[in-house]
């Protein structure tokens, strides 16, 4: 038990300041429980309906005390909740509710090991509590030094609620880590708990000047020599007691936005950008949405929890409300506060709610608009931010082409690629269209495993010869995503590795005539290749797209490419059988040599295998390929 406590307090909580946030959150939680219970039994308020949290510092005793007038605990509660590591009193509270009440209980936050964060800074913790509705002589005192044992005794406690007193360790009661510094405690409350709707109070300090000594008539001794800060009996609220997102954006400093982001995400880095809006309409809600600077490690683990924090009228409902964002925006963090959703909303109800769908659509549009603002800005700082965003989250955004048809055009405008004329991933579809040749009727693109493979693809040869720019897509998600995007701004998109290449007005009559002549001349070779390759190839044709390479593989429109087949197989999915078409270059010496070659069969198989490798595919029998190549090299 001692080792486990050590692990909890030194590994789970690496930042000592966290204990303030956790204990204030627990106090707020206890008040929420009382408010919930009192809906059925108003007497639990005991004529004290003003819920609050107080923090008291005693420099002489070297203690900090967190007091709330919430639901409180009796002896059984303290033994069950405080005496068991990671036992969530809130969770047990919810378990007792009937099925219908559980939905209402969703508003109660759940805190498990948070209480034990106090042992980071304290060598002993004393808890004094009395449960609301029970007599004063049923109070309880729970004491532990954090080594695995505790004592419990019955006490008289006039006020309901809980007081948690931390007896600070020596290293946390002096120097830089002095938590007896009231100013430090106030700063931590403002940083971590400013949005708690309950007032968080500390005793007010005032400056008291020294009073002159009237008994001494000398001028030197009659003048006051200074003063000091003294505590009064008055309690002052040190938090704004209003959620950050409920304040006007014009009143909030950037530092406040950043601190709030770090508080809700535990991200050490500041966010890349954010947007804060109040949405009016059929559904009213406030959105505070952040784009992180870096992608999390589990970004591509789609089962990982994601989503926004959901509040209803400033009452916390749940973390990770994934229904408030489409999956392709799962990296977005932030808060949604709705004025229309019921307090008893559950995850199941969120999935069925029309209001939630409206909020999700609004959030998606807002995020895409925010990103478009960065992408289209002439400000270099914003352009740099967009470039950083795209390097971290560009591939995830592409998923939206297939998941969010309503915003497909917005998403397409954000995408950036390398091209056959520029290796940097900076070209948008709009940029490409602006550079299209006269007479070009399609946006040409090519998918490949990486940039080198794309730039050296045989499919590019004709386009390079004619000086036609081609977009190079090298992400694993590209080919899947492009199945859903067939045009951009009324211009069709064409994968140059699929189907026939029709350059239209970019191809002159002489070239077309030569292509038709080659079809006739190469017919015997083509027919023989079909026979030799058998079911390896769907068809064999004379190519109009090749310049330097002897052959390439082409798949039909709507068919799976070798890269897509390979990706699906790696994901463990069954892939329908798909055969490519082999296109041969009639002007290449190797193809011209085929007809008279005594090794026609071996040479045909090698040409097919090389075309497969150039297209990013995998050989079914690498050993057979090497054997054929070696035999051809020796002759």
Image: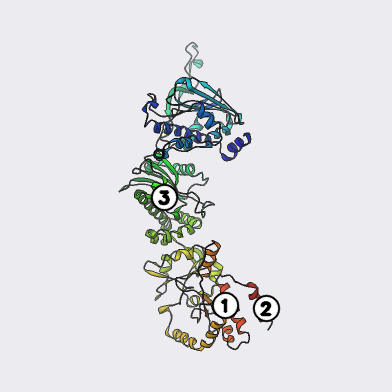
**Circle 1 SS class:** helix
Q: Earlier in the sequence, mark 2 or mark 3?
A: 3
**Circle 3 SS class:** helix
- Left or right? Give the position of 602 relative to 530: right
Disc 1 marks which residue? 608
* Numbered badge on residue 389: none
In front: 544, or 319? 319
- Residue, far left: 282
Disc 3 marks which residue? 323
- Residue, far right: 634
Q: Earlier in the sequence, mark 2 or mark 1?
A: 1
Which residue sits at x=43%, y=68%?
A: 432
Q: In the picture, residue 452 is in which quadrant? A: bottom right
Query: How far is disc 2 from disc 1 in space, using C-alphas?
Result: 16 Å
State the quadrant of the N terminus. Answer: top right
Tag 3 and tag 1, C-beta contact below 8 Å: no
As drawn, 346 above or below 329? above
State the quadrant of the C terminus. Answer: bottom right
As drawn, 277 above or below 185? below
Which residue sits at x=43%, y=36%?
A: 97
Residue 548 visible in rendering: no
- Residue, far front: 98
- Left or right? Give the position of 591 relative to 241: right
In front: 283, or 257? 283
Query: How far is disc 3 from disc 1 in space, using C-alphas?
Result: 49 Å
Residue 441 image position (x, y, % from top left): 39, 74
Query: How far is disc 2 from disc 3 in space, using C-alphas?
Result: 59 Å
* Numbered badge on residue 630: 2
As drawn, 30 above or below 230? below
């Amino acid at each position: 038990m001692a080792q486990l406590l050590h692990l909890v307090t030194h590994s789970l909580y690496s930042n000592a300041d966290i204990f303030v946030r956790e204990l204030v959150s627990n106090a707020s939680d206890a008040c929420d429980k009382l408010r919930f219970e009192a809906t059925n039994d108003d007497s639990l308020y005991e004529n004290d309906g003003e819920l609050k949290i107080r923090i008291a510092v005693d420099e002489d005793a070297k203690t900090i005390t967190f007091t709330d007038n919430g639901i409180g605990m009796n002896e059984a509660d303290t033994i069950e909740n405080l005496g068991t590591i990671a036992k969530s009193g809130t969770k047990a509270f919810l378990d007792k509710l009937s099925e219908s009440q559980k939905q209402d209980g969703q508003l109660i936050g759940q805190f498990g090991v948070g209480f034990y964060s106090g042992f980071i800074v304290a060598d002993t913790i004393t808890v004094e509590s009395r449960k609301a509705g029970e007599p004063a002589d049923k109070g309880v005192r729970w004491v532990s030094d954090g080594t695995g044992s505790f004592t419990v005794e019955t006490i008289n406690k006039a006020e309901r609620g809980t007081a948690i007193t931390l007896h600070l360790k020596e290293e946390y009661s002096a120097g830089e880590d002095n938590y007896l510094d009231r100013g430090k405690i106030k700063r931590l409350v403002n940083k971590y708990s400013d949005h708690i709707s309950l007032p968080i109070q500390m005793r007010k300090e005032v400056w008291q000047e020294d009073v002159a000594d009237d008994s001494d008539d000398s001028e030197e001794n009659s003048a006051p020599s200074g003063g000091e800060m003294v505590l009064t009996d008055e309690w002052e609220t040190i938090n704004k007691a209003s959620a950050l997102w409920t304040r006007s954006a014009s009143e909030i400093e950037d530092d406040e936005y950043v601190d709030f982001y770090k508080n809700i995400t535990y991200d050490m880095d500041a966010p890349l950008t954010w947007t804060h809006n109040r949405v009016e309409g059929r559904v009213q809600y406030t959105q505070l949405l952040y784009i992180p600077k870096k992608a999390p490690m589990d970004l591509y683990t789609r089962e990982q929890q994601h989503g926004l924090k959901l509040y209803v009228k400033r009452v916390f409902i749940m973390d990770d409300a994934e229904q408030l964002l489409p999956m392709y925006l799962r990296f977005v963090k932030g808060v949604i506060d709705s004025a229309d959703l019921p307090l008893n909303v559950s995850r199941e109800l969120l999935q069925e709610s029309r209001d939630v769908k409206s909020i999700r659509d609004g959030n998606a549009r807002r995020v895409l608009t925010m990103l478009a603002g960065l992408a289209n800005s002439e400000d270099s700082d914003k352009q740099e931010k967009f470039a950083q965003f795209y390097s971290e989250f560009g591939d995830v955004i592409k998923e939206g082409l297939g998941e969010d048809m309503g915003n497909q055009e917005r998403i397409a405008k954000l995408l950036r690629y390398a091209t056959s004329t520029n290796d940097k991933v900076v070209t948008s579809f709009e940029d490409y269209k602006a550079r299209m040749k006269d007479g070009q009727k399609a946006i040409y693109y090519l998918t490949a495993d990486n940039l080198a493979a794309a730039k050296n693809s045989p499919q590019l040869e004709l386009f390079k010869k004619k000086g036609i720019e081609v977009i190079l897509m090298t992400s694993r998600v590209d080919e899947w995503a492009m199945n859903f995007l067939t045009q951009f701004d009324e211009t069709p998109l064409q994968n140059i590795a699929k189907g026939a290449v029709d350059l239209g007005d970019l191809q002159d009559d002489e070239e077309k005539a030569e292509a038709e002549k080659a079809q006739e001349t190469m017919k015997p070779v083509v027919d023989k290749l079909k026979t030799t390759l058998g079911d390896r190839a769907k068809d064999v044709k004379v190519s109009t797209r090749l310049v330097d390479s002897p052959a390439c593989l082409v798949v039909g429109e709507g068919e799976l490419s070798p890269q897509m087949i390979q990706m699906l197989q790696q994901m463990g999915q069954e892939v329908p059988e798909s055969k490519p078409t082999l296109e041969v270059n009639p002007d290449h010496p190797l193809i011209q040599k085929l007809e008279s070659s005594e090794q026609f069969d071996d040479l045909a198989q090698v040409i097919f295998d090389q075309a497969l490798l150039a297209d990013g595919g995998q050989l079914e029998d690498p050993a057979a390929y090497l054997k054929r190549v070696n035999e051809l090299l020796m002759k």
